[in-house]
Amino acid sequence: MELAIAALTLVSTVPLLLADDLPYVKLDVGGQTVTMRFDSGAWDSGVALTTADVERTKVTFTGTTRWQNAMGNVLSARKFIIPEVRLGALVLHDVRGNEVVFAPDYAPPKKDGQLGFAFLRNYTVVVDFPGRQLKLYDAAEATLPAECGSQVAPLEIGAAGLQSVARTNIGTIRVGWDTAAQASMLTPEALSVPESRYVLGEPHELAEFTIGNVKLGPLKVRSVKVQIPGVQGLLGFDFFNEHVVCFDARRGAVAIAPPRGKK
């Protein structure tokens, strides 16, 4: 799979704060600064605010929504429209959002809101953990910015969002691209770990891991019973911390490059 590599119009550069093996960004929501997790795995979620942030920002409520998190918990929350949201130099109006709630037994270290990929799907998105930044480019042309390198693989949009098919030494699997996963993980079934031997978070290494024609192995993963429709695992913080990953959701492409200065 090939896309032209060229200079594009840079829409916004946003600093990334990495803490607790999670990425955070700052948004201006109706004149209020809100810090939230950047979650590429939240395809259907745009701006999700905590109850406290909902109360201090100006929103117009439109109803309720229900969803299932990665551990299978079904949750519900309020939906709303935000008059104006700023992410760096990017300014959007009448942005759909929702309240974020957490299951009692499954929540991030900081119960912050999240910026989901629905907010960014119309841009070429450069996720650069090593450079501590998120870049948004105009996606009108079939090109990728230079920092994305030349290794391009297929990207699909499934029921659970951004995902790709990988060929590995344990078979062909489907993984989600999830910046808000604190580690890369596969289900024990994908790793052929029987229930009697399952240990949450047990480390494994895949000698081969190839997406499209891009060889990314060996890959270290954790054994976790994630329950995400259509995928057997997630590429999380450790993977993004070692690569620059560029998403072109419009054209179904993901580019993976080493950080600047590394080959």
Image (cartoon, grey):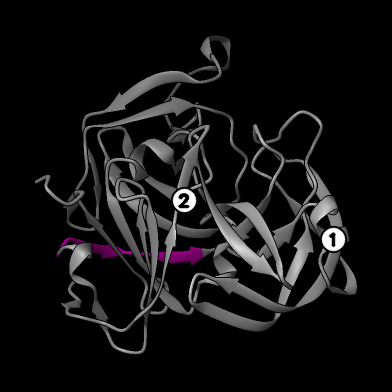
Magenta: predominant secondary structure element? Answer: strand
> From where the camera sits, is residue 251 visible?
yes
Tell which of 160 and 50 is nearer to you.
50
Q: Of the residues under marks 1 and 2, which one precedes in the sequence?
A: 1
Which residue is disc 1 drawn over? 56
Which residue is disc 2 drawn over? 176
- Which stretch appears magenta? 150-157
Judge from the rendering whether residue 55 lies leftward or rightward of residue 1; answer left or right: right
Instruction: Look at the image and say whether residue 204 sits in the magenta stretch.
Output: no
Name the residue: 77% across, 64% down. Answer: 98
Q: Nearer the viewer, mark 1 or mark 2?
A: 1
- Name the residue type under label 2: Gly
Separation of residues labelled 1 and 2 (CA atoms): 33 Å
Q: In the rendering, at what x and y percent does residue 192 appear? A: 43, 24
SS for callout 1: helix
Vertical position of residue 38 compared to residue 207: above or below: below
- Name the residue type under label 1: Arg
Judge from the rendering whether residue 138 lies leftward or rightward of residue 57; answer left or right: left
Which quarter of the figure has residue 183?
top left
Residue 100 circle label: none
> From where the camera sits, is residue 65 visible?
no
**Residue furthest top in the image:** 196
Q: In the rendering, at what x and y percent does residue 177 appear? A: 44, 52
Name the residue: 50% across, 48% down. Answer: 231
How many labels sit on residues? 2
